[in-house]
Image (spheres, coloured by chain):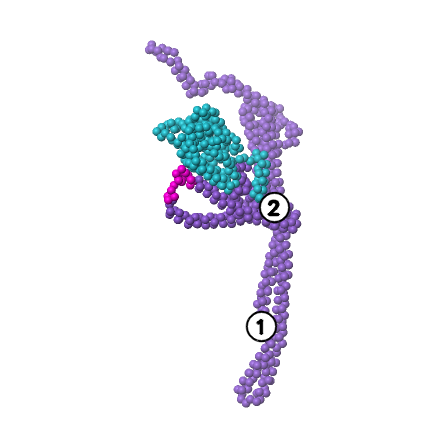
Chain colours: A purple, B cyan
């Protein structure tokens, strides 16, 4: 469109430009749009919208009572529901924890009972041994005491004064014949010495006996002290186990006693040992996987696993099961309940059978390790044959015999010898490994009992904590719903605050005119948390959701 | 005796598991095709060596077949050997050595042919492989890929069905070094033919790649 310019000229596209300018102005000032042509939910801006808002506020004021009820019932019902779930979950969680504690306490009591029985058995054996040990000791003691008594009697029978007098008297005849005093003195001394020597001669064996018997007596006494110490220690262990057992069985506070028994530490130790054993399994798998192809063949997959690998896994499982039976039959573990009811003879038979099977597995693995070496050698030779042909001269043009290099031939035997020795050593190492691993696998059954039992306890404890946590979460959600409900009601009343205010003023005036009512009664409608003036239904009363929510929060 | 019993027990349990659909075969069938026409006959000894290193890497239970490309290749007369390797490694190693000897003997006494019926040879190999139960199937072509059909046996128009077959062209000699574009165009043409027939095409230029491509190791 062409528009004439003030100077008489023509401005091309002036109308379009104006339209664009108008639209820009509208974008810059949205209030203009609202005032001119805008609408909100189909209601034009300006007085129609204001009227609609006022109308809405009035409708909301009129509908306040039922709307409040709807909001209360929606949010408070949800809050009540979550509060109930929370209570139930907390209850279940606490009960689960108690049951777990009971189980742990029972397990601990079982353990202590076993320990007491073991100590009792040990003490019984020790008592029998004690009788055998103390018999000879007491005999020795009796003999030593008797010898010492005899020696003491012999010593006490000797009267040294009498012996000296006799010696003097015996010396008298010779004194009479002698002339000099010196001679007399010498004679007396000699006679006294001789007589005393004769009298003390019977005492010497007694003294020797005392000297030899006293160290033996000391040794015997030490042995007796050691026996007494051992005996006292065993008795103390039994007493300690018994008192703990009594405490666990009879005490009211089983939870604390159960908490004293560590579940995690033995479990971690058992897991560590089993992990090491599993590393052995891994090694074993690679040792027997390839030779298993000689037994079961190749070319098939079972569930995505090659047949030799599958067979090797089965063999390892069988070895492990045999190990478990061996350990249970030997009484080291209590994994298989059937062994508890079995007679001692039956268990012995199972022990021998499982031991024999394990020995056979060991021999089988050793054989397989040799087969493995042979297979590897054969495959390598086959590859070498093909590769040598590829690298060698063409078939149509055989190389002359003289072309073979002499120095390489001379060096080859020495290298081959070294290789053979190395291969022999590696085969020997494989043999040892293959022989040992089944027994190590059997030993892995030892911590298995701890892992299984303690895992059950750990899972139970975690489950109880999870229930308690969920209960706490439900209670929190319940509280959130209740508060959202209260907030929505507050917003609702805020929107209609003007009619509410007017209503309050009018009511107050009316009541003051009537001369009755209190300020509290007048302002009831503005109180959110106060009990509803309407009479609650019997159903609502029986449920009492607010009380439940109060408890939950 | 013990081995037989173990094999019997294993076979029984495998048949039970196979009935449940848990057991699948990992074996492959490989068909080697040697071109004996024209000048390529001189390359057959090298080709058999490549076939040998491929066989050396094959697993127990795999199947091996071999035929040659001559004037009229779609014929049982052109089949050199067909053998399945035993399922145990030691016996498989012995069988592989036997195959080496057979290929060596064949390479020593191979006779040249006048025409090059490649499509006929592919049809023959495909026909043989379709009879096999193995899930993975390969045709290894040792040829210069230059087809030359005789009047009496023109298979250039026959339809090939190579569905589920991996065709590997190995040791493709460049017969005309002056025109590399012809060589590349010829390879592209063969690739299109194989793919159109439902097969998978590969070209092997290095000897060590062939066993890897066949065994997937």
Q: Look at the image and tell me in which quarter the C terminus of chain A lies.
A: top right
Chain to which mark 2 belongs: A
- The number of numbered discs placed on residues in the rendered structure image is 2
Does A467 sit above or below residue A217?
A: above
Pick the residue in front: A296 or A174: A296
Task: Answer whether residue A534 is magenta in the image.
Answer: no
Chain to which mark 1 belongs: A
SS under mark 1:
helix
Q: Position of residue A93 (x, y in %)?
A: 60, 39
Pick the residue in front: A291 or A413: A413
Task: Name the residue tied to disc 1.
Answer: A208
Q: Nearer the viewer, mark 1 or mark 2?
A: 2
Tell me which segment is drawn in magenta: A387-403
Q: Which mark is residue A348?
A: none
Residue positioned 57% across, 23% down in the render: A61
SS under mark 2:
loop
Crowd class of label 1 (few under 14; some 14 to 19; many from 20; radius 10 Å): few
Where on the picture, by quarter, is residue A16?
top left
Residue positioned 54% across, 84% down in the render: A186
Task: Name the residue tied to disc 2.
Answer: A335
């Amino acid at each position: 469109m062409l528009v004439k310019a003030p100077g008489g000229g023509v401005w091309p596209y002036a109308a379009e430009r104006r339209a664009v300018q108008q639209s820009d102005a509208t974008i810059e000032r949205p209030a203009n749009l609202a005032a001119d042509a805008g609408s909100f939910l189909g209601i034009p801006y300006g007085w129609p919208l204001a009227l609609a808002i006022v109308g809405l506020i009035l409708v909301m004021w009129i509908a306040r009572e039922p709307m409040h009820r709807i909001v209360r019932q929606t949010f408070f019902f949800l809050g009540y529901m979550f509060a109930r779930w929370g209570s139930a979950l907390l209850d279940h969680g606490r009960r689960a924890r108690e049951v777990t504690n009971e189980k742990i306490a029972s397990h601990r009591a079982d353990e202590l009972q076993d320990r007491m029985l073991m100590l009792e058995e040990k003490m019984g054996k020790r008592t029998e041994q004690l009788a055998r040990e103390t018999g000879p000791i007491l005999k020795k003691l009796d003999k030593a005491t008797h010898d010492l008594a005899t020696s003491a009697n012999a010593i006490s029978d000797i009267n040294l004064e009498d012996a000296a007098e006799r010696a003097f008297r015996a010396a008298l005849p010779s004194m009479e014949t002698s002339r000099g005093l010196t001679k007399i003195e010498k004679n007396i001394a000699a006679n006294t010495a001789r007589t005393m020597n004769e009298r003390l001669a019977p005492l010497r064996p007694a003294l020797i006996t005392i000297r030899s018997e006293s160290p033996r007596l000391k040794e015997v006494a030490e042995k007796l002290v050691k026996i007494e110490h051992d005996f006292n220690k065993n008795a103390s262990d039994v007493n300690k186990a018994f008192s703990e057992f009594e405490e666990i069985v009879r005490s009211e506070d089983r939870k604390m006693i159960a908490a004293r028994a560590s579940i995690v530490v033995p479990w971690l130790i058992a897991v560590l040992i089993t992990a090491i054993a599993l590393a052995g399994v891994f090694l074993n798998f690679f040792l027997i996987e390839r030779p298993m192809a000689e037994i079961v063949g190749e070319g098939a997959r079972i569930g995505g696993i090659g047949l030799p690998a599958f067979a090797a896994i089965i063999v390892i499982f069988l070895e492990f099961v045999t190990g478990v039976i061996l350990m249970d039959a030997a009484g080291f573990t209590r994994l298989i309940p059937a062994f508890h009811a079995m007679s001692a003879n039956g268990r012995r038979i199972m022990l021998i059978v499982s031991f024999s099977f394990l020995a056979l597995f060991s021999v089988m693995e050793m054989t397989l390790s040799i087969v493995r070496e042979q297979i590897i050698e054969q495959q390598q030779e086959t590859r070498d044959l093909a590769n040598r042909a590829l690298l060698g001269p063409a078939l149509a043009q055989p190389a002359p015999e003289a072309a073979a290099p002499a120095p390489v031939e001379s060096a080859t035997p020495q290298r081959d010898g070294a290789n053979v020795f190395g291969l022999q050593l590696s085969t020997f190492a494989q043999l040892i490994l293959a022989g040992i691993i089944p027994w190590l696998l059997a030993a892995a059954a030892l911590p298995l009992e701890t892992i299984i039992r303690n895992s059950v306890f750990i899972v139970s404890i975690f489950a109880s904590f999870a229930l308690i946590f969920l209960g706490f979460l439900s209670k929190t959600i319940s509280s959130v719903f209740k508060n959202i409900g209260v907030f929505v009601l507050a917003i609702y009343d805020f929107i209609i605050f003007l009619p509410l205010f007017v209503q309050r003023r009018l009511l107050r005036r009316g009541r003051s005119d009537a001369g009755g009512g209190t300020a509290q009664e007048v302002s009831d409608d503005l109180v959110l948390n106060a009990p509803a003036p309407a009479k609650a239904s019997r159903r609502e009363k029986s449920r009492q959701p607010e009380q439940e929510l109060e408890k939950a929060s | 005796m013990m081995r037989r019993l173990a094999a019997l027990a294993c076979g029984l349990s495998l048949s039970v598991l196979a009935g449940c659909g848990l057991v699948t075969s990992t074996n492959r069938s490989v068909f080697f095709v040697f071109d004996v026409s024209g000048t390529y006959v001189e390359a057959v000894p090298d080709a058999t060596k490549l076939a040998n290193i491929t066989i050396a890497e094959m697993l127990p239970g795999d199947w091996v077949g071999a035929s040659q490309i001559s004037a009229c290749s779609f014929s049982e007369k052109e089949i050199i050997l067909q053998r399945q390797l035993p399922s145990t490694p030691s016996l498989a190693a012995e069988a592989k050595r036997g195959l080496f000897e057979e290929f060596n003997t064949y390479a020593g006494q191979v006779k040249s042919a006048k025409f090059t019926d490649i499509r006929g040879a592919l049809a023959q190999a495909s026909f043989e492989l379709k009879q096999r139960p193995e899930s993975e199937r390969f045709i290894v072509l040792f040829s210069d890929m230059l087809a030359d059909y005789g009047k009496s046996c023109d298979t250039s128009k026959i339809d090939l069905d190579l569905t589920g077959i991996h065709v590997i062209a190995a040791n493709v000699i460049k017969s005309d070094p002056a025109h590399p574009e012809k060589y590349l165009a010829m390879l592209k043409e063969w690739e299109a033919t194989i793919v159109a027939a439902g097969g998978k095409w590969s070209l092997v230029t290095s000897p060590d790649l062939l066993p890897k491509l066949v065994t997937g190791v």
